Amino acid sequence: MSDEHALAFLARLDQLSVKEDFLPNVGPAMIHDVDDPATMHLLELALSTLPDIEANTIIADEEGLHWKTIHRTSELVKYVAEHSPRGQGTFNFTATAMLKPLSPFFPGSYHTGPGRQFAIGFEGANVVADVFTKDRGNAEAATADLTAALTTHAKVADNIGNKVAQETGWSYVGVDPTPAPLGDVSIAAAIEDFTGAKFGSSGTLTAARIITAAVKAVPVKQIGYSGLMVPVMEDKLLAQRWAESTYNIDSLLAYSAVCGTGLDTIPLPGDVSIEQNGQNVRRCRVARHEVETSLCRHGCSRFQTKSQATRLTFRIRTSSTPRFTHCPNTDREVRFLDRRDGQSMFRSSLKPFRSLLVGDG
């Protein structure tokens, strides 16, 4: 299939996703380092012109780092930042390492099997906030209570997943108990509830370890990321703290010593070079590949660039009305845009969750 016909097909899929209200993820453009990099050019065009299509690359696995894919990924991020409307196409792309198939969280999700499989994930940073407010500063109590709280919700999702599988014939592959944040439902605010200080201050690493340990201890069939997510530009308070310089890329990589946070929606200057971008990706990938503990097996990199280095922009799923806020003591304006809720064909059954189901067929 030519690039022209392939792009036309993706455009029809993008239009169908709007009509039927689902999020389309076409998976990795490169899975192995020996894959044809020509697919990356097609993905550049798709991410630059189609508002909802999501995709990824895999830049490390058990066999090692994918150096060619890392370089091509850096080129893609630069291209899409310069050619997509308002530079926002990069919000629908990620580079992943050590992440197994069938994770329910986009855009890192992919599958290599027969299809008709699904997983469940939900946004639960508010659950962490409730526990951390109650157990401020008490690591032992917070770990136990957060495990119990996440287990309550995960078991509900697990029961729904098994029921859906029985009714549809699809294969249910598990729950990702990651307490994902979004906007005002902030993982930064939850961590600050525990530490009593701004995100990035002393105690943040401890809180990251507590969250990851609690997630890993949830006794359901787990799949996907299953750790702590720190998406800088998807979390309103995380974005504000970044603008206030309370943490940086080095901080996030340090937190990766106890969790799989990676570098997620990191804002970069619009004039960042391909080489500089590649260095950031390599730093994250080397960290993910070298740390072999069970708490640190997954990671993702999402970098957003803008022509104006002082503007930070939220990743969006679809066009919508923006909300603006000004970060105190900085000259940087943080722009937040709503995105479509992650919903599924089983939305009525999964009403308590903002769920993403993965599969085809």
Image (cartoon, rainbow, N blue to C red):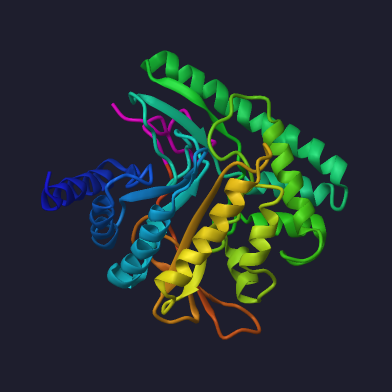
Which one is in front, 237 or 358?
A: 358
Q: Is residue 343 above or below residue 136?
A: above
Please name the predominant secondary structure of the magenta segment in the image: loop
- Between 330 and 59, the one nearer to me in the picture: 59
Asked if residue 223 lies in the magenta stretch, the reply is: no
Q: Residue at x 54, y 40 (%)?
A: 122
Q: Position of residue 109 (x, y in %)?
A: 43, 41
Q: How far across and how far down the image is residue 355, in percent?
A: 48, 38
Relative horizontal placement of residue 315, taking residue 199 as reference (left or right): left
Bounds of the magenta segment = 343-361
Say which residue appears at 43% left-offset and 82% top-offset. 308
Q: Is residue 310 left or right of residue 339?
A: right
Left of 37 or right of it: where is 156? right
x, y percent for residue 125: 64, 48
Q: Is residue 340 visible in this depiction of the protein?
A: yes
Q: In this rendering, is residue 261 above or below 162?
A: below
Rendered position, 87 above or below 285: below
Q: Is residue 320 visible?
A: no
Point out residue 304 in the picture as x, y percentages from the top left corner.
Answer: 45, 67
Quadrant of the drawing holding the C terminus = top left
